Amino acid sequence: MLNIVTLGDERLQKHSILVPEFDGELQTLVEQMFETIHINRGIGLAAVQVGKLIRLFITDIPKYGPLVFINPEIVETSVDQATYEEGCLSIPDVNADVIRPSQVRIQAWNLKGRPFTMDAEDLQARVIQHEFDHLNGLLFIDRINPKKRERLVKHYEKVSNS
């Protein structure tokens, strides 16, 4: 299992770089990331959350199964938006309602280096957007009211320091 980078680590605020090679090292990292989300009962994980500043994230939502997104780009989002309570393995025990587009179209590469395009909606679209944000140095708390964010960060700091 990999260690998860948590709030306060400056890497979570940085833009990740393109994955340069589809090699055995990448395959091993992806396997370790899946192991990490299963142990932590997560449904998505970006490479930056395990300390790797590369454009890679995984999802494993029961209805859809495990998916790998390498060098992804969200190319379209719906006008329709939805509110849903989000959490994050990098900010344990903190949840907040976040408004996001309810549908997305994403282009990425799989582990074999093959490009694909996928349409997602509802929870899958939300998880994709949440993980994609990580690649651009954004956390879900960056998408909420600043006063509420401040309260949640103080709560997190209090809980994590005790």
Image: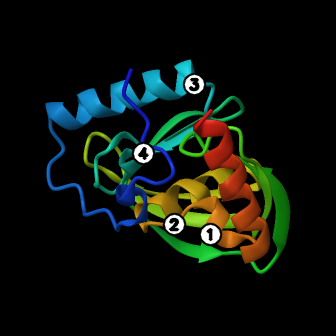
Measuring from the top left, give residue 85's x and y in whole percent.
81, 52
Secondary element under disc 2, as helix, strand or loop, is: loop
Residues at circles 4 and 3 in contact by the CB criterion of under 8 Å: no
Question: Does any portion of residue 145 appear in the rendered image?
Answer: no
Residues at circles 2 and 1 in contact by the CB criterion of under 8 Å: yes
Residue identified by numbered label 2: 138
Upstream in sequence: badge 4 or badge 1: 4
Residue plotted at (60% across, 38% down): 160
Question: Does any portion of residue 1 appear in the rendered image?
Answer: yes
Measuring from the top left, give residue 90's x and y in whole percent.
53, 44
How many angstroms separate mark 3 from mark 2 (CA)?
21 Å
Upstream in sequence: badge 3 or badge 2: 3
Residue identified by numbered label 4: 49
Count the labels in the image. Answer: 4
Three-letter amino acid code at the position of disc 4: Gln
Residue plotted at (35% across, 25% down): 32
How many angstroms separate mark 4 from mark 1 (CA)?
16 Å
Please determine whether, in this image, residue 98 is positioned above or below residue 41.
Answer: below
Mark 2 neighbour class, 10 Å CA radius: few under 14, some 14 to 19, many 20 or more: some
Residue identified by numbered label 3: 40
Residue plotted at (28% across, 54% down): 54
Please determine whether, in this image, residue 67 is positioned above or below residue 102.
Answer: above
Most foreground residue, 79 or 7: 7
Mark 4 neighbour class, 10 Å CA radius: few under 14, some 14 to 19, many 20 or more: many
Please determine whether, in this image, residue 135 is positioned above or below residue 157.
Answer: below
